[in-house]
Image: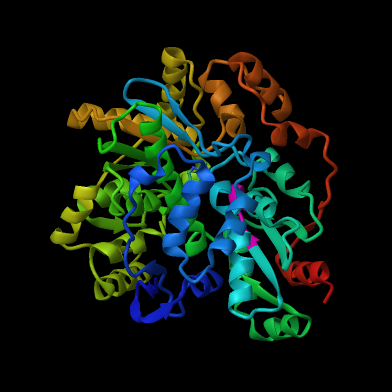
Amino acid sequence: MHYYSTRNEKNVATASKAILSGLAEDGGLFVPESVPSIEVKKLLNMTYRQRAMAVLSDYLTDFTTEEIEHCVNGAYTVEHFGSETIAPVCVVTNQVSFLELWHGPTCAFKDMALQILPYFLTTSMKKQGQDKTVVILVATSGDTGKAALAGFADVEGTRIAVFYPDQGVSKIQRLQMVTQKGDNVFASGVKGNFDDVQAFVKQIFTDKAYREKMNESGFDFSSANSINWGRLVPQIVYYVHAYCEMVDKGEIKLGETINVVVPTGNFGNILAAYYAKKAGVPIGKLICASNQNNILTDFIRTGVYDKNRDFYVTESPSMDILISSNLERLLYHLSDEETVCDLMKHLSETGKYQVSDTLKHRLQELLWADCCDDEETEQMIAKMYAENGYVMDPHTAVGYGVYEKYVTQTGDTAKCVIASTASPFKFNACVSRALGSETDQISEFQLLYNLADKTGLELPVSLKELEQLPVRFDGVVDKDGMYGAVSGFLGI
Ligand SMILES: *Cc1c(COP(=O)(O)O)cnc(C)c1O
């Protein structure tokens, strides 16, 4: 299996090369040359790890079976994910089930990919003859930074440094990062906003002189951001797994079509569902749920992608995004490289593009889109809890709200799996408020305990223990201090 760049099919790579490079040289994203079909019947009554082996083997064709086994067995353990199921499917009503993707170490779905990416990367390094220590640099607005730290902690042959905007992350998110254990990890606040932090990380990545200095000391840079194929491919697994679980539980018959709802930001998670559908998993509509930053809703309905609009800070912050990078991959699969180049050129020059009617119709056949604002999000959390006793985090609640709109507008009552992307405890203030609890003047940790008391849910140990863990990284640098911070961490 080869991978092409979405902007030039002549840029070909093996899986390991695509994973090591992250982005193609022409600025495009790597996509598989074809989507291997999956025979669901063979994957029934299997464990998550067995299903992961089957799916990943189709895509990582330059990895040996032993290498894939090493990756899967290292990442998807009971120790990291709390149970053998790894991603439980929770049937809540006759129509609605939740695919819970947040049982990993950081309580959000990014663990599903970031727990296995370090194994993919180190295996790819060996295959590509990379003998240097790989340094992962991450600019984060919260969730990704912690998930990357947790994934790379103590992974041999790697170092990881995470920079976050000092005033731009929640108290829990900051504590999650600055208390991270491991001998190869580093985190620092930066005086500035997320854009400043990201600009610096880009600058250091492309600084030739600095890279030479690092190379001489036995280091090289790599990236763990969400356009890396190594982050997307593990996400295909859980949609296959979800379908199999629905059959195994007797919720659906083998072959019955289900709809899938995905609360969407960068379009990675929903794109993985697209690959599963294309591989033959009986998935009907892919329902794309957005918050008030509803650029994707508008795009799927009108064919016009326009990022010249207000940016809103919402209760579902991991979806506060105006450029959904992974959309480029879907546009490529539904059209061709010339179209993608043309659209991306318009996007970078004017912040806007419009697709042809043909492409718009293809998108609409596949996807249905709508959005929920914060008020609707809280109403959904309250309603779901009152009617079914199930607690949703705000991102998942956006998904549920959009599902209700879908049913009202289309009358399609096929069974539906909603991707549940974070533990409610990770966004405890919003969830507590929605459930009618007092939140003013109450500390983060007291909110956690109160929410556990109220709902009877078990408080995730990884959040509870934050109160006691020693702070390892209390540094805050200004933008000029970031080079020094990286050099100090690497000892160069
Ligand atoms: C990252 C994230 C999302 C959005 O996922 P994309 O792959 O960017 O679409 C949704 N919910 C949570 C909790 C997240 O952390």
The x, y position of residue 410, in whole percent, is 18, 32
| Residue at the (66%, 49%) spot, across then down | 146
Residue 140 inside the magenta-drawn segment: yes
Residue 299 or 453: which is nearer the viewer? 453
Quarter in which the N terminus is drawn: bottom left
Residue 248 inside the magenta-drawn segment: no
Image: magenta residue range = 138-144
Left or right for 233, reference 452? left
The x, y position of residue 332, in whole percent, is 29, 66
The x, y position of residue 181, in whole percent, is 79, 50
| Image position of 90 with respect to 309: above or below | above
Quarter in which the C terminus is drawn: bottom right
> In which quarter of the view is residue 439 placed?
top right
Left or right for 437, reference 232? right
Residue 258 or 435: which is nearer the viewer? 258
The x, y position of residue 68, in whole percent, is 55, 60
| Image position of 337 with respect to 181: above or below | below
Q: Is residue 311 visible?
A: no
> In which quarter of the view is residue 307 placed?
bottom left
| Residue at the (65%, 22%) spot, across then down | 440
Residue 356 or 154: which is nearer the viewer? 154
